[in-house]
Image: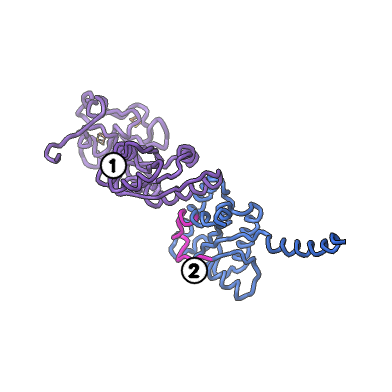
Amino acid sequence: MEQQTAQPEMTVIGGVDEIVEEFQPKIEAMICTYCTYAAADLAGSQRLQYPPTVKIVKYPCTGRISVAHILKAFELGADAVLVGGCEVGTCHFIEGNLRATERVAYAKKLLEETGLGGDRLEMFYISASDSHGFVNAVNEMTDRAKKMGPNFLGQARG
Amino acid sequence: MIVLEQKKFQEIEKMTTGYNRLLVLGCETCAAMSFAGGQRQVAELASAIRVARKTTGEQGEVLEEAIARQCEPEFVDLIKDEVSGCDAVLSLACGAGVQMLAERFQDKVVLPGCNTTFLGVTEELGVWSERCAGCGNCILDKTAGLCPIARCSKQLLNGPCGGSMNGKCEISKDVDCVWQLIIDRLTRLNRLEMLEEIFPVKDWSPAGHGGPRKMVREDLKS
Ligand code: SF4
Ligand code: SF4
């Protein structure tokens, strides 16, 4: 009898717990003020829905992002990092996004070698008007992080 | 400059395993210009080691530091305290820097994080190439400022050899024949007749073939 009454309660609590405890990855978006930041802003104005997983760090240009910045984000517990720069050929500083592309490639390799996984990092080219592009990028990285599981460095820090 | 290349991460990881407190030490001169061991590369590598250590469950702290030059005792001595507090130093300097550390810190494990490759130039950002072999007796005055010892695959002093083809060395079509370059440059300088002088057999003793080299300047010594 006790069990019977407890059972539905358990299910409810279990259900709530599941929702609460479902892994919500932490995505850090390192994005350029001229393009992806504007796209993120527009996504908000358009009330586009995307998971609340993303924290934005605004850069003057993705060319300013160093490999060390990216690694630091992971060290501090980010489950995935997305770098969002202007479309190729439209960088305000001519080739900042191309530099970022190369650095992301280098960092991906390093992440793979460290065992954390290179897929936790990706470069996206998102123009200022491409709010959907931003949403897709966040969704993509959220899915990847969910698939790959939490960054164990984040766990270690509680 | 001395051109360096950072070792593969896996090699670094393996060699640093077991050293709990590890100091990653950069060198802000040639190593920084090679983008292999400056402050930035120290931050990157230390971060990567920390991440990798978390994967393997290895404990310990990875510290970061960079000094102006690891080949000068004055600079090396500045980090005495930091070094004494760690179990090993991973040096991102050239082989000379690594050895200077080993000399100054007799009881400390010192590990090389870079491969020292050659004396060369930065052709453009990200591209370096060899220019000098440190032969100890420079002959650039006779070769239009282009070194056949460092840049001719056979170190010919009276080149080119018969393998020079369309300006390229016979070992690879990606390698310029330096003797072709010498002739081109002497032609431009209107000094082609210089090639008529035959180089005698070179004395290789100043090049290190006479044992490890050392230089003493009494006027500078204290
Ligand atoms: S001749 Fe000797 S010292 Fe001069 S550049 Fe060539 S290797 Fe260096
Ligand atoms: S082709 Fe030119 S660079 Fe190559 S070995 Fe002959 S002389 Fe030297």
Asked whether mark 2 lies closer than 8 Å to ligand 1, one says no
Q: Position of residue A45 (x, y in %)?
A: 60, 76
> Residue B123 placed where, x, y %?
35, 46
Please determine whether, in this image, residue B136 is positioned above or below residue A17. above
x 46%, y 37%: residue: B15
Residue range (magenta): A56-70
Would residue A115 be visible to someone looking at this image? yes
Q: Is mark 1 within 8 Å of ligand 1?
A: no
As drawn, A117 above or below B216:
below
Instruction: Evaluate whether label 2 is on the same chain as label 1.
Output: no
Please say whether residue B151 is one of the residues in the magenta stretch: no
Residue B115 horizontal side relative to residue A82, left or right: left
Find out whether residue A66 is within the magenta segment: yes
Q: What residue type is labelled 1?
A: Cys
Left or right of A54 in this view: B37: left
The quarter of the rendering in which ligand 1 is drawn is top left
Q: Which chain carries label 2?
A: A
For label 2, the crowd category at 10 Å Cα-Cα, with few meaning under 14, some 14 to 19 and many 20 or more, is many
Q: Colour of chain B?
A: purple
Residue pointed to by mark 1: B71
Secondary element at tag 2: loop
Quadrant in which the C terminus of chain B is drawn? top left
> Mark 2 sits on what residue?
A34
Looking at the image, which residue is at 24% across and 30% down? B213
Chain letter of the residue carrying label 1: B
B190 or A56, which lies in front?
Answer: A56
Q: The blue chain is which one?
A: A
Q: Is residue B5 visible?
A: no
Label 2 is placed on what type of residue? Tyr
